Image (cartoon, rainbow, N blue to C red):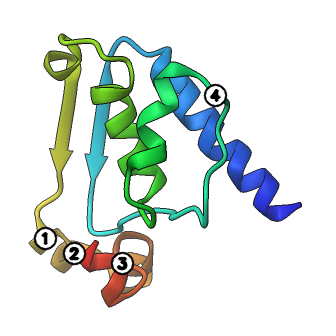
């Protein structure tokens, strides 16, 4: 049941991105939730997922869905990405750092 819910989460996220006119990605040190596998409806906007490498975060899948899934050549001009400076963590109080830092070295490398 848990995997089924996670699979629905991926479908819901990609569906919402497909309906969006803009994409705003705000990224920090955490890579994000990586689904174990995906099973999406047989829709043209999800075709790319079949050949995309596994082990990618939902956040990455959302960005790719917006940029490539719709096959809209104007998508790139409507996507905005904001990246947090790595030294930002130095200003975060110790009690809150776990909320902003990568979960593991592996998560930070993705």
Q: Is residue 65 left or right of residue 24?
A: right
Q: Is residue 96 above or below residue 105?
A: above
Mark 3 vs mark 2: which is more N-terminal? 2
Mark 3 or 2: the one toward you = 3
Mark 2 or 1: the one toward you = 1
44 or 105, nearer to the observer? 44
Q: Residues within 10 Å of mark 3 (few under 14, many from 20)?
A: some
Mark 4 vs mark 2: which is more N-terminal? 4
Where residue 43 appears, x then y in whole percent?
A: 59, 22
Q: Is residue 52 above or below residue 62?
A: below
Alpha carbons under labels 1 and 4: distance apart: 39 Å
Residue at 23% over, 17% down: 75
Mark 3 or 1: the one toward you = 3
Q: Secondary structure at mark 2?
A: helix
The circle on residue 89 is 2
Alpha carbons under labels 2 and 1: distance apart: 7 Å
Q: Which residue is mark 3?
A: 107
Mark 4 or 3: the one toward you = 4
Residue at 70% over, 55% down: 6
Image quadrant in which you'd find residue 16: top right
- Asked if labels 3 and 4 touch by Cβ distance under 8 angstroms, the answer is no
Residue at 30% over, 31% down: 24
Q: Secondary structure at mark 1?
A: helix
């Amino acid at each position: 049941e848990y995997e089924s819910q996670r699979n629905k989460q991926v479908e819901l996220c990609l569906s919402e991105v497909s309906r969006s006119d803009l994409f705003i990605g705000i990224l920090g040190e955490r890579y994000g939730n990586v689904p174990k596998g995906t099973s999406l409806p047989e829709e043209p906007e999800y075709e790319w997922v079949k050949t995309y490498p596994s082990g990618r975060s939902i956040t990455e899948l959302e960005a790719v869905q917006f940029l490539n899934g719709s096959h809209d050549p104007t998508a790139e001009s409507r996507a905005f990405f904001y990246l947090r400076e790595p030294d930002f963590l130095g200003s975060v109080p110790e009690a809150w750092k776990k909320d902003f830092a990568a979960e593991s070295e592996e998560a930070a490398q993705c």
